Image (cartoon, rainbow, N blue to C red):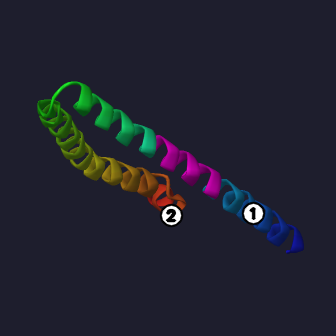
């Protein structure tokens, strides 16, 4: 039992140490993205924001459209791989 708890605590420590690094990388990339959009708008015109907004809206709609079937497929795969269900079928 001690080995399992020790391994679990090592795993949690690894996750706890990786989360701040990943979050700081996310913030840096977000800052770069916002700065790039500001520079592009400043160098071209304000009209460039409309295609960017349309693109982001389209990506969001596609993500929402495909996430529901993806979750359903994962659920069905879990059901079919279940040992109790496989014994009956």
Residue 22 colored in magenta in the image: yes
Instruction: Establish if 87 lies above or below 52.
Output: below
Q: Nearer the viewer, residue 34 or 54?
A: 34
Q: Which residue is mark 1?
A: 13
Q: 82 or 7: which is nearer to us? A: 7
- Residue 43 lies, in percent from the top left, at 25, 25
Highlighted range, magenta: 20-29
Looking at the image, which is closer to me, 77 or 43?
43
Which residue occupies the foreground of this view, 89 or 84?
Answer: 84
Residue named by callout 2: 84
Category of crowding for the residue at label 1, using alpha-carbon neighbours closer than 10 angstroms: few (below 14), some (14–19), many (at least 20): few
Residue at point 14% right, 34% down?
46
Could you tell me which quadrant the C terminus lies in?
Answer: bottom left
Hey, which quadrant is residue 38 in on the image?
top left
Q: Quadrant of the N terminus?
A: bottom right
Q: Find residue 81 and report its horizontal and vertical position in percent.
A: 49, 52
Q: Mark 2 or mark 1, which is nearer the start of the sequence?
A: 1
Q: With 74 as the anchor, is 68 left or right in this view?
A: left
Residue 89 visible in this rendered orientation of the protein? no
The answer to whether residue 69 is left or right of residue 83 is: left
Q: Residue furthest bottom?
A: 1
Q: Which element carries disc 1, helix, strand or loop? A: helix
- Displayed quadrant of residue 7: bottom right
At 67% from the left edge and 58% from the top edge, which residue is drawn?
Answer: 15
Residue 86: give x, y in percent of width and height.
Answer: 48, 55
Task: Using the rendered image of the protein, determine whether residue 50 is visible from the camera's viewpoint.
Answer: yes
Mark 2 element type: helix
**Mark 1 and mark 2: Cα distance apart in space:** 35 Å
Q: Nearer the viewer, mark 1 or mark 2?
A: 1
Q: Which mark is residue 76?
A: none
């Amino acid at each position: 039992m001690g080995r399992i708890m020790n391994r679990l605590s090592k795993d949690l420590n690894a996750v706890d140490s990786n989360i701040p690094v990943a979050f700081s990388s996310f913030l840096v990339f977000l800052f770069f993205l916002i700065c790039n959009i500001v520079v592009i708008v400043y160098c071209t015109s304000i009209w460039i924001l409309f295609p960017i907004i349309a693109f982001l809206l389209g990506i969001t709609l596609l993500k929402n459209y495909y996430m529901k079937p993806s979750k359903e497929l994962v659920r069905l795969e879990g059901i079919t791989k279940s040992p109790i269900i496989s014994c009956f079928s």
